[in-house]
Amino acid sequence: MRVAVIPERCVGCRVCELVCSERQEGTFRPSRSRIQVLSFDETVQDVPIVCQQCADAPCLAACPSGALSRNKKTGAVVVDPEICTQCQTCVEACVVGNGAVDADTKLAIRFDDEAQAPAKCDLCEGDPQCVKFCPTQALLLTDAPPTSAELSVGGMTKALKHFLRQEELSALRQGGE
């Protein structure tokens, strides 16, 4: 299972970040969320970035301490903070959004300085709150493998351009004239 992102449905409300941070950390702080919303000025679009629970899971393979494992119930790659050595190899190995954003922020797996551990989606034990509360159904729980566009932020922005006509895009850039 994984959370699929349908970027053209996202309205940038960031409810997903709020409910995730509350579920995972007990606080409404988007910076502590396991899902992060990127804003793209060139398409006037927001795109949620979340772990795609890759079948080959580069983060899982890269972990030298065995702190990452697959949850038997959900299949999600989860972090055991008791075993984690804080080496951040899993963060470096993540391919979701690779090369499109600052390596310290907005990836599907990131190092949480406050918790001193990697932070990534664990599918909320099979009931992802981001999916449950997304008002536009931009997030869906699926067992379909991720597409290459879902693994690449660049691919997501290219896909978005198909949903915005060029004249609409030009008007938005010029302030709606």
Image (cartoon, rainbow, N blue to C red):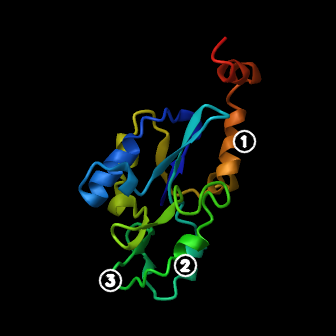
Q: Which mark is residue 20?
A: none
At x 39%, y 68%, the residue is: 113
Mark 2 touching mark 3, by CB under 8 A?
no
Three-letter amino acid code of the residue under disc 3 = Glu
Q: Which residue is mark 3?
A: 82
Residue 75, horizontal then vertical, whole percent: 45, 69
Three-letter amino acid code of the residue under disc 1 = Lys
User: Mark 2: which secondary structure?
Assistant: helix
User: With respect to residue 160, does 148 lie above or below?
Assistant: below
Mark nearer the N terminus (2 vs 1)? 2
Q: Is residue 99 left or right of residue 63?
A: right
Three-letter amino acid code of the residue under disc 2 = Thr
Distance between the Cα atoms at labels 1 and 3? Answer: 40 Å
User: With respect to residue 64, does 5 lie above or below?
Assistant: above
Q: Nearer the viewer, residue 141 or 160?
A: 160
> Looking at this rendering, what residue extends furthest in the right direction?
166
Q: Is residue 174 left or right of residue 125?
A: right
Residue 121, horizontal then vertical, whole percent: 43, 61
Q: Residues within 10 Å of mark 2 (few under 14, many from 20)?
A: some
User: Mark 1: which secondary structure?
Assistant: helix
Distance between the Cα atoms at labels 2 and 1? Answer: 29 Å
Q: Nearer the viewer, residue 148 or 94?
A: 94
Mark nearer the N terminus (2 vs 3)? 3
Q: Nearer the viewer, mark 2 or mark 1?
A: 2
Mark nearer the N terminus (1 vs 3)? 3
User: With respect to residue 43, does 67 lie above or below?
Assistant: below
Q: Which mark is residue 89?
A: 2
Quarter holding residue 107: bottom right
Q: Is residue 156 left or right of residue 144?
A: right
Residue 32, horizontal then vertical, whole percent: 36, 57
